[in-house]
Image: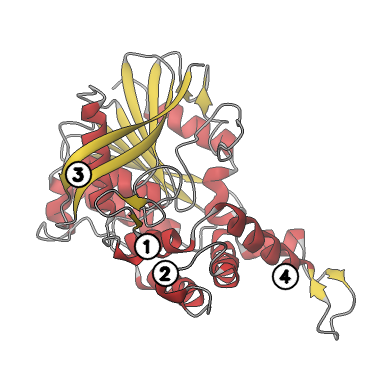
């Protein structure tokens, strides 16, 4: 499988929100050498690193089980591209990057962006690479929101869309989870209004990740794996921890090692702003833009963050407005994370989705 990592620098970019960048960098991973191109959009703390071997200084690949020779996203047949989302710290313009206009880190001077902004930037970067049309745009979670915006914003550019574990607009409970995560970061004394140096608000970021991990799993997963087992000492001592507590602390500390706190703030706010109907006259009017095209809505049976009914609702709205939309479901106890774990089912659904019409 051919694999490349590079970046596109776009001059003088204005996004739908009105955010202006004198210079916008889009890091990307480029896999395969087929004639048709598939755009994959990554989730909240994911990156451009879809597949392949991890090299020094690179993030972990997150979809290597479905991207590669002979896999659902077959790199012998397709060219598969994944951009690092704007506001994410893995090479694209973000709060952690330096603003070329003044040589200072963007920090909280970075503009608030939506999934639509991110989709527009990725479309511009694809055009800069000479790509004039996509076979499909695919994404899960926040990546699904960006993929859906790309499809609806540019229906003649994206032939079909796979919306995985994501709604067509964010519901209040998910916004509430994000608000608590952001508050934990901003309440950390080391956040310093976003102008931190060095490690920064590691305690706040770790706590935010701990809450997020609860929403990514299901109660059945936690019960099957840990139930009431102790990790050490006794439940009656403050030094003692249940296994589930140890699990959450571990994942909080792991994220702190690889992610920027300000980026986390901006990306969760980006998710909050997801609403395909905003500025378009409502959800039905937005779906009409994609009429005549193909949509797979893939839900997860145990997803508590973006429940399966929200994906089904999006599919029904799409179909009502002329989209060739259909729904499938990953049957799993793994919760929202199933799209990053249950690869056998995911591979099957994506293969079917990509079959010639």
Residue closer to the observer: 123 or 154: 123
- Given contact means CB atoms under 8 Å apart, are the residues at marks 3 and 4 in contact? no
Label 4 to label 2: alpha-carbon separation:
28 Å
Residue pointed to by mark 1: 107
Question: Which image quadrant for residue 265?
Answer: bottom left
Name the spot of residue 13 as percent of width and height, x first.
17, 45
Determine which of the numbered discs, if any, sits on residue 194 in the image.
2
Type of colouring: secondary structure
Q: Earlier in the sequence, mark 4 or mark 1?
A: 1
Badge 1 marks a residue whose secondary structure is: helix
Residue pointed to by mark 4: 245
* Left or right relative to 116: residue 171: right
Say which of marks 2 and 3 sits in front: 2
Residue closer to the observer: 356 or 338: 338
Q: Earlier in the sequence, mark 3 or mark 4?
A: 3
Residue pointed to by mark 3: 152
Name the spot of residue 26 as percent of width and height, x first.
33, 39
Q: Earlier in the sequence, mark 2 or mark 3?
A: 3
* Left or right relative to 48: residue 123: left
* Left or right relative to 188: residue 294: left
Residues packed near mark 3 inside 10 Å, few (<14), some (14 to 19) or many (20 plus): many
Q: Earlier in the sequence, mark 4 or mark 2?
A: 2
Please report the residue visible at 45 percent of the width from the left and 61 percent of the height from the top. Answer: 264
Say which of marks 4 and 1 sits in front: 1
Label 2 to label 3: alpha-carbon separation:
34 Å
Question: Which image quadrant for residue 254?
Answer: bottom right
Residues packed near mark 2 inside 10 Å, few (<14), some (14 to 19) or many (20 plus): some
């Amino acid at each position: 499988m051919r694999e490349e990592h590079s970046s596109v620098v776009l001059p003088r970019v204005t996004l739908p929100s009105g955010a202006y960048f004198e210079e916008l960098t889009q890091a990307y991973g480029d896999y395969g050498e087929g004639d048709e191109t598939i755009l994959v959009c990554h989730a909240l703390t994911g990156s451009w690193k879809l597949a392949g071997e991890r090299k020094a200084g690179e993030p972990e690949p997150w979809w290597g089980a479905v991207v590669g020779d002979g896999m659902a996203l077959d790199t012998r047949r397709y060219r598969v591209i994944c951009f690092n989302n704007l506001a994410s710290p893995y090479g694209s313009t973000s709060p952690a990057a330096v603003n070329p206009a003044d040589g200072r880190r963007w920090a909280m001077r970075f503009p608030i962006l939506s999934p639509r902004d991110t989709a527009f930037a990725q479309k511009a970067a694809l055009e800069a690479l000479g790509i004039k049309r996509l076979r499909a745009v695919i994404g899960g979670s926040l990546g699904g929101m960006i993929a859906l915006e790309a499809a609806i914003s540019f229906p003649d550019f994206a032939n079909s869309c796979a919306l995985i574990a994501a709604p067509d607009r964010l519901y209040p409970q998910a916004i509430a989870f994000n608000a608590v995560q952001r508050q934990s970061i901003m309440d950390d004394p080391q956040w310093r209004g976003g102008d931190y140096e060095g490690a920064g608000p590691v305690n706040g970021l770790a706590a935010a990740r701990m809450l997020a991990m609860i929403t990514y799993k299901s109660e059945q997963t936690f019960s099957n794996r840990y139930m009431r087992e102790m990790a050490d000492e006794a439940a009656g001592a403050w030094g003692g921890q249940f296994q589930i507590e140890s699990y959450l602390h571990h994942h909080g500390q792991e994220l702190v090692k690889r992610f920027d706190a300000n980026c986390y703030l901006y990306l969760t706010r980006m998710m909050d702003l997801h609403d395909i109907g905003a500025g378009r006259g409502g959800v039905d009017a937005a779906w009409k833009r994609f009429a005549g095209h193909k949509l797979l809505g893939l839900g997860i049976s145990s997803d508590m963050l973006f429940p399966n009914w929200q994906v089904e609702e999006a599919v029904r709205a799409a179909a009502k407005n002329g989209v060739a939309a259909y729904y499938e479901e990953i049957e799993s106890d793994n919760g929202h994370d199933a799209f990053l774990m249950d690869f056998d089912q995911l591979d099957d659904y994506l293969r079917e989705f990509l079959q010639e019409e």
